[in-house]
Image: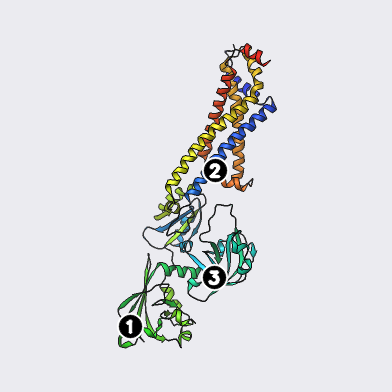
Amino acid sequence: EYKDITVSNKLRLGIRNTFNIFTKFSLLFLVFLFLVAGFLLEYASFKRAEYEESISGYNNFFTNTDDRRIIIKKDDKTYFTDDDYLKIEKLTNVDYIIKDDLLLDNSISIHSGDTYLYGNVKSLDALEGIVDVGEMPKEENEIIIAGYKDDYYLSNQKETILNNNFLISDFGDDTLFKVVGIKYIDENLIVRVYGQYEIYGSDLLLNKTREYTEKRISVMKVNLEGKVYETKFWGSFMNVTPSNLVNVGEAYISRDYNGYCKNYNCLNKEIGISNESLYYINDINLKITKTYTKNNFSSLTGDTNYEENQGRIYISNEDYNNLFQTNYYQSSVFVKDVEEISEVNNNLKALNLDTLLIKDALITYDEGAAQIINIIKLITTIIFVVVMFFISYFIIKIILKSRNIYFTIIRILGVSKKVCKKLLDIELFAVANLAYFTFVLFVSLIRNNIIEVEFLYNTVKFLKITDFIMIYLIIILITQLISNKFAKSLFKKSAMKTFSEVV
């Protein structure tokens, strides 16, 4: 028995045994590569399923539930300055900032004839690439519709959309927007279209959407002769409306409102208008200089439909804009890597900001069902590990059957079972490590888009370094179990008896 064989000699002999027969090494390598790929992809699939499940909830206030989004506001409730945004942009892992995030959570409806499209408004600057059908907008009233390629309107009814004018009834005016392009969204990517479509447009569309949204979330009140009336943005009664035909400091009201004034005459009376939101209150005082009827309605206001607009209070564009703030009190930060969003959140808080991670504000559809799914996943994983172990063991046992003679001969020459077992361990561990790190390198190339396999990228991108370590330990454990089981069957008989059976 060779009692003085050193560790270095064991290692050198074990490595030599790993590569001395190319066919045997290749077969073992493929088996372990299959084992590693199976575990990593299976676990990555579970991680992806958990991720998709985590973003499958909803929020009644925030329709844009992108898990990369952090809603921010200053803890003193003042508006953001350019310096504030500059500090935020410099933070690590910050992708971009949406200063006016009111647009993120509000949708509009556009229609032309019997065609109705509903979706969120975005700036043309946010459009990635170019349109797939049509052309890019050139005029301020031209827009792009984005959605999935298999959508009925975007695939089968393109002619009813392209180059047609659409009215946005939510805005309460007759401004028409022309669809000049269609952009298709890749369905294989994990993205979300909030609403049915995404509508890209110029500042004209953005400003009108912002105005419409602010009217919805603010409370506007009219003080006439000491009595306060709260207006509703969807109605015409006391609804404050801008008009470029009204002079600054003046207001045009319906003649029917004379009954609300002393002596049934509102001319030259003062009317107070206030607008209150979550963060500010603005108010103005104007002089009623004209009253309108059906006969002079269009000439005084510029609107044409008297029946729908009767009762509105018309003021100048400048006065109307003074009722709203142009500063931003709430914004949204989007991170590059959602796995590091907690660190970004802490850094934002360090800047004296109140934050809300949108992923933490979601209402899940059925938490009980999610728990059942997790239990099923655990059971599936256990079964998978057991099945993979036995499949790998029996294949490796067949491959290593030719090694019986080798281990029998070195035992006859005096090498102990313990040393033989160590040589077997080294051989299997060497192949297992080569297979593991080869596949990890392949995964790394995919994650860095050096090798482009979209399906695999969308799966393995959810793996963290801790996941790779865990899978590595499982592979090593299985390799050890395979080695122990094979060694037990190989060395349970004497060397001479084993030799006589295999020769």
Q: Which residue is at a point 50% across and 67% down the rendered structure image?
A: 108
* Pointer 2 residue: 45
Decide which of 452, 168 is in the foreground and name it.
168
Confirm or deny contact between disc 2 and disc 3 (CB under 8 A): no
Marking on residue 401: none
Q: Which residue is at a point 31% across and 81% down the rendered structure image?
A: 225
Query: How far across and how far down the image is residue 105, in percent?
Result: 46, 61
**For numbered disc 3, what is the local secondary structure?**
strand
What amino acid is found at the position of numbered circle 1 in the picture? Tyr
What amino acid is found at the position of numbered circle 3 in the picture? His
On the question of residue 478 being in view, the answer is yes
Tell me which numbered mark, 2 or 3, is placed earlier along the sequence: 2
Q: Which corner quadrant of the image does residue 489 belong to? A: top right
* Pointer 1 residue: 260
Tell me which numbered mark, 3 or 1, is placed earlier along the sequence: 3
Residue 50 to residue 381: above or below: below
Q: Identify the image's colour scheme: rainbow, by chain, secondary structure or one colour.
A: rainbow
What amino acid is found at the position of numbered circle 2 in the picture? Ser
* Pointer 3 residue: 111
Q: Which residue is at a point 54% across and 54% down the rendered structure image?
A: 191
Confirm or deny contact between disc 2 and disc 1 (CB under 8 A): no
Q: Which corner quadrant of the image does residue 255 belong to? A: bottom left
Tell whether 223 sits left or right of 22: left
Give the quarter of the figure containing the C terminus.
top right
Tell me which numbered mark, 2 or 1, is placed earlier along the sequence: 2
Decide which of 17, 117 is in the foreground and name it.
117
Q: Measure the C-alpha gap from mark 3 to mark 1.
A: 38 Å
Numbered disc in front, either 2 or 3: 3
